[in-house]
Amino acid sequence: MFESFWRTVGERSTIVIPGWKTMSYFSDVRSVCWFLETEFADEVRRLHRLVGNAKVDDGRSIVVGTGSTQLFQAALYALSPLDGPEPVNVVSAVPYYSSYLAVTDFLKSRLYKWAGDACGFPGDDSPYIEIVTSPNNPDGFTRKAIVNGSCGKTIHDLAYYWPQYTAITEEADHDIMLFTVSKSTGHAGTRIGWALVKDEEVAKRMTKFIEINTIGVSKDSQLRAARILKVISDGHEWPVTDGTERFFEYGRRMMTDRWERLREVVRSTSRFSLPQFTPAFCKFAGETTETHPAFAWLKCEMEGVEDCEGYLKSHKILTRSGKHFGMDIKHVRVSMLDRDEIFDLFLERLANL
């Protein structure tokens, strides 16, 4: 969906990297995250100050990763007791992002293991790690930590806490906050994410994980991401003279239009239902805004249809079943971020069922 915006930006978002540049493993040996490019770190802080969605000026560290998935793995490693008698439990409230389960259990680590729904976790004196995704993937709701145990740690995945998806109601201030360019700007192929980490020792352990895992993160990708973030901040901080739309205004307009059209189709068919969200005042936009998640959490309401994914697939609509998110198969997740022609075709096929 964001591709059309970046086409209008043109050369302002283009970067040329000479063959002699970024050849070393190291970026700044004085930094906790020694492979973090200073230019990228500066633009990350600048964008968060502009949007007001996360604290960055209180001494916390930035750790760069190959997308937020690697940072999630690094955070699990950093928060897990190395001398624990058994793996620490990892939980998240359903419906949870499907990759959490897969990534947590993939290597069958002795440090941590997937323990399922946070709502059913006892929260006693045993250690645990809770993942809080807000806005949530797949259903789009704002989330807070649920488990209230004395030995727990939390990872806040804030990949969708940007003005095109939801109201920016506060400056998030959590111990570990994960972000990614794939959801903030649309550049999934750049494979860059970042974590804002309050505890320096945790940041060092996360950095160590990435060092052992991939010996750092691509500098070329960091420099490209830095240029992309700079274009966004410049567009909002300086007067627009060439008629180009500001990025977050573009994103909010597109998401508003798509959600309005989807809700109209769903109302007309009465075969499906969608979550309802409460509007909130957005400090970034300076007005009350609706929530428009990157995914639609669609539920089949038809009698005799249990497998919503299978039913839609039979009508050439590809979705992801609720079973992957810890839910029943009457729910599916639908991407709201595809190109215009694909989204239009989705609505057409949904309306014709």
Image (cartoon, helix red, strand yellow):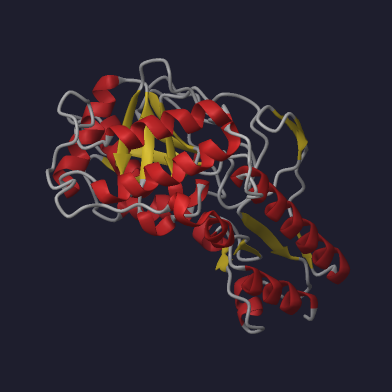
Q: Nearer the viewer, residue 100 or 3?
A: 3
Task: Give the vertical position of 80 relative to 115 (above or below).
Answer: above
Report the side of 274 relative to 35 (left or right).
right
Q: Report the residue at 67% width, 72% height from top.
A: 306
Left or right of residue 272, residue 173 in this image: left
Is residue 233 rendered to the left or right of residue 110? right
Asked whether the viewer can see residue 320, the reply is: yes
Q: Which quadrant of the figure has residue 311? A: bottom right
Q: Horizontally, is 203 left or right of 284 in the view?
A: left
Residue 151: x %, y % from top left: 37, 22
Foreground pick, 345 / 341: 341
The quadrant in which the C terminus is found is bottom right
Q: Residue 80: in sight, yes or no?
A: no
What residue sits 18% from the left and 47% below the top?
21
Q: Position of residue 80 (x, y in %)?
A: 27, 33
> Is 346 or 137 nearer to us in this picture?
346
At x 45%, y 51%, the residue is 13
Q: Position of residue 331 (x, y in %)?
A: 64, 62
Q: Position of residue 219 (x, y in %)?
A: 24, 46
- Which of the pair 16/168 is nearer the observer? 16
Please determine whether, in this image, residue 245 is positioned above or below residue 311. above
Q: Quadrant of the N terminus?
A: bottom right
In this rendering, is residue 57 above or below 309? above
| Residue at the far top in the pictured view | 58
